[in-house]
Image: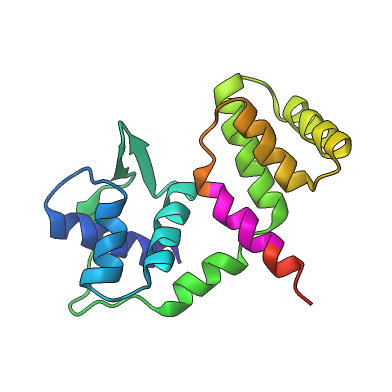
């Protein structure tokens, strides 16, 4: 799956001729110009690529974390829709919470247990779900968790259906 995502990233960067792009310079071509995805799916793809470490943020731009010349782009390449539907199903609450905890740890230099204890305390005191408490604690420390908010929202909505 990562190899197909890398092909998409390499394709977009090679197409632009730049080494750094704004996030919108990635998701707009995927949706508007190429018509491969809806705008929401394309934005989700960029967020997932950031979470998986295929892209890195640097001074307001994103750049690939792998050498673009190492990726062979097949002639007539079109991504499979399966790549994007699998991304949503791979989001487990534990993975999301661990990702948020890592972001808090980078910002605060606290260890995993300290952060988890704080999240558990906030969840209990405020009578909220642990994932929501994780976002709350991250926000308290001014951590950028924008890459996680959609995942938390969609997970909460799918768990509460029925």
| Image spot of residue 124 (x, y percent) | 88, 38
Along the horizontal axis of the image, is 40 left or right of 125? Answer: left
For residue 15, above or below residue 121: below
Image quadrant containing the C terminus: bottom right
Label the magenta part by its dominant secondary structure: helix
- Of all residues, the one furthest to the front in this rendering is 126
Q: What stretch is highlighted in magenta?
A: 148-156
Along the horizontal axis of the image, is 60 left or right of 116? Answer: left
The residue that appears at 17% across and 77% down in the rendered structure is: 75
| Image spot of residue 159 (x, y percent) | 75, 67
For residue 4, above or below residue 101: below
For residue 112, above or below residue 98: above
The residue that appears at 78% across and 45% down in the rendered structure is: 130
Does the magenta segment cover residue 11?
A: no
| Image spot of residue 97 (x, y percent) | 68, 45
Q: In which quarter of the image is residue 11?
A: bottom left
- Of all residues, the one furthest to the left in this rendering is 17
Out of 153 and 8, give the one closest to the viewer.
153
Total numbered badges shown on the rendered structure: 0
The residue that appears at 37% across and 66% down in the rendered structure is: 39
């Amino acid at each position: 799956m990562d190899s197909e995502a890398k092909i998409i990233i390499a394709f977009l960067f090679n197409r632009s001729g730049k080494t750094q792009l704004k996030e919108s310079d990635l998701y707009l071509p995927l949706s508007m110009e190429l018509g491969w995805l809806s705008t929401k799916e394309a934005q989700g793809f960029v967020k997932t690529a950031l979470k998986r470490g295929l892209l890195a943020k640097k001074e307001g731009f994103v750049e690939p974390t792998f050498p673009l010349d190492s990726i062979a782009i097949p002639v007539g390449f079109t991504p499979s829709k399966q790549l994007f539907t699998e991304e949503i199903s791979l989001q487990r609450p534990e993975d999301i919470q661990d990702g948020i905890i890592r972001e808090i740890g980078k910002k605060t230099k606290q260890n995993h247990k300290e952060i988890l204890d704080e999240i558990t305390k906030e969840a209990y005191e405020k009578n909220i779900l642990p994932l929501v408490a994780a976002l709350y604690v991250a926000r308290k420390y001014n951590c950028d968790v924008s890459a996680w908010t959609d995942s938390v929202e969609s997970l909460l909505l799918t768990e509460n259906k029925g």
